[in-house]
Image (cartoon, grey):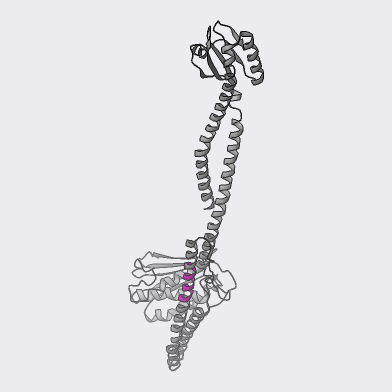
């Protein structure tokens, strides 16, 4: 913006200077020519009385004195053909002046001035002088240099003023851009200092108001999520009591383990909602997990339900540990979301395959089934055609993107759905499930 404003001022100043200085320069040259012509004409006008009344000797002496004083050649043409002073041939202007008409004519080397002198008994005499080109343009070059220097000074002054003006505009805009980037990076305490023109100060105030409003909304949302999660503790307690009342020890242990996992997830959700400062905050810095251990544990958990519904589970698990850049609870939630979708969107008896492979850039988790496939649009948050919340694939996608990966949807050879999660590599120390 500073460069564009400087170019605009420079162009405007140059156009203004051209509009004024060019006519002024032409006027200076015209004035110099007229001044030299008037001076030469005044000099030879002094010869008119002498040429009109004096004898030849007096005229010759006067012409020689004038030539010496002015430095210009002066010639006097008498009616009898005698030429006094500079011996120059008769020109067309001299012939015309002999008929009684004084005039000024342009020559290659300067300007010719001829004056007709009437009143002599023998006819009309003519006085002729030539103003050299150097005298006609004397001082013009210096005046043009002064005008050019003045123009350059004005352009530089305009650029300096434009740069200072642009700086007062650009600095607040740059600060607004910096604050907006900080807000985008979840630094919600960033505020802009109102400065610059009234319009920019108004924008800064609106941005600060927006940041404060975002803080309030996020705080309210986190409190609502924490409150909702806290309410889940009562049914969890009831589930735990029901699990303890089961007669089969294996069933009681399995249900209790599931309740423990659910309670840990609720506790983590409460902590995240209350104390997480923003999307860029990573808590204690532990942002990695063993994908092999977590995937194996979650598949084992869902295998019990698969056995009850007649589903065949195929697990192809890479040797661990396999660290990925995702917190353990988020990775477990992503795996549960994918496996839960298989049970929710395929009929009983439909088998599925879970494959976890190691890559140089992290790990790849794919869940494929032999069901009808995933309809278009289910990747959108909140979209569902089976009465669910529609957040499963979105949870998995966000977990993959948090590690620098992505989620891909496809179809298997038999027509079923294939969901692939690509996780980025671990960044810090490894955590378990």
The answer to whether residue 358 of the structure is visible from this angle is no
- Rendered image quadrant of residue 126: top right
Q: Pick whichever, 395 or 169, lies toward us.
A: 169
Spot occupied by residue 23 in the image (x, y as percentages of width and height): 51, 35
Spot occupied by residue 374 in the image (x, y as percentages of width and height): 36, 68
Q: Pick whichever, 301 or 137, lies toward us.
A: 137
Residue at 52% x, 40% y: name it. 17
Q: Which residues are magenta?
A: 206-217
Residue at 54% x, 16% y: name it. 114
Would residue 6 be found to the left or right of residue 310 on screen? right
- Residue ranking furthest to the top: 80
Spot occupied by residue 47 in the image (x, y as percentages of width and height): 59, 16
**Magenta part, dominant SS:** helix
Would residue 88 be found to the left or right of residue 384 on screen? right
Say if the magenta span includes residue 216: yes
Say if the magenta span includes residue 271: no
The answer to whether residue 35 of the structure is visible from this angle is yes
Residue 376, compared with residue 103, is above or below; it is: below
Residue at 50% x, 47% y: name it. 8
Spot occupied by residue 337 in the image (x, y as percentages of width and height): 42, 75
Q: Pick whichever, 345 or 61, lies toward us.
A: 61
Would residue 92 be found to the left or right of residue 309 on screen? right
Number of labels in the image equals 0
Q: Pick whichever, 80 or 177, lies toward us.
A: 80
């Amino acid at each position: 913006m500073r460069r564009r404003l400087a170019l605009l001022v420079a162009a405007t100043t140059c156009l203004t200077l051209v509009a004024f200085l060019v006519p002024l320069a032409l006027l200076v040259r015209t004035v110099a020519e007229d001044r030299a012509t008037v001076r030469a004409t005044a000099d030879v006008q002094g010869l008119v009385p002498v040429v009109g009344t004096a004898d030849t000797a007096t005229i010759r002496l006067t012409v020689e004195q004038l030539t010496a004083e002015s430095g210009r050649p002066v010639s006097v043409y008498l009616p009898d053909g005698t030429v006094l002073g500079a011996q120059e041939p008769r020109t067309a202007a001299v012939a015309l002046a002999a008929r009684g008409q004084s005039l000024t004519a342009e020559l290659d080397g300067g300007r010719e001035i001829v004056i007709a002198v009437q009143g002599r008994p023998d006819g009309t005499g003519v006085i002729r002088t030539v103003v050299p080109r150097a005298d006609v343009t004397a001082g013009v070059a210096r005046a043009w240099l002064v005008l050019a220097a003045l123009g350059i000074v004005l352009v530089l002054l305009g650029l300096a003023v434009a740069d200072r003006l642009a700086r007062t505009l650009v600095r607040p805009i740059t600060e607004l851009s910096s604050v907006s980037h900080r807000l985008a990076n979840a630094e919600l305490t960033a505020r802009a200092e109102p400065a610059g023109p009234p319009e920019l100060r108004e924008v800064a105030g609106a941005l600060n108001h927006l940041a404060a409003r975002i803080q309030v909304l996020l705080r309210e949302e986190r409190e609502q999520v924490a409150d909702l999660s806290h309410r889940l503790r009562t049914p969890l307690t009831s589930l735990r009591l029901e699990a303890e009342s089961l007669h089969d020890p294996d069933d009681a242990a399995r249900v209790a383990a599931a309740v423990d996992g659910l309670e840990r997830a609720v506790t983590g959700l409460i902590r995240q909602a209350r104390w997480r400062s923003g999307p860029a905050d990573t808590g204690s810095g532990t942002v990695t997990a063993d994908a092999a251990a977590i995937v194996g544990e979650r598949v084992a958990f869902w295998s019990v339900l698969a056995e009850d519904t007649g589903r065949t589970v195929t697990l192809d698990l890479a040797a661990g540990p396999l660290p990925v850049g995702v917190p353990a609870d988020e990775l477990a939630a992503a795996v549960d979301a994918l496996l839960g979708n298989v049970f929710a969107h395929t009929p009983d008896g439909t088998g599925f395959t879970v494959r976890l492979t190691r890559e140089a850039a992290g790990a790849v988790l794919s869940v494929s089934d032999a069901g009808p496939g995933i309809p278009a649009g289910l990747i959108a948050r909140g979209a569902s055609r089976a009465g669910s919340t529609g957040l499963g694939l979105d949870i998995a996608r966000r977990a993959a993107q948090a590690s620098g990966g992505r989620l891909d949807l496809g179809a298997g050879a038999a027509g079923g759905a294939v969901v692939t999660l690509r996780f980025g590599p671990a960044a810090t120390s490894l955590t378990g499930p």
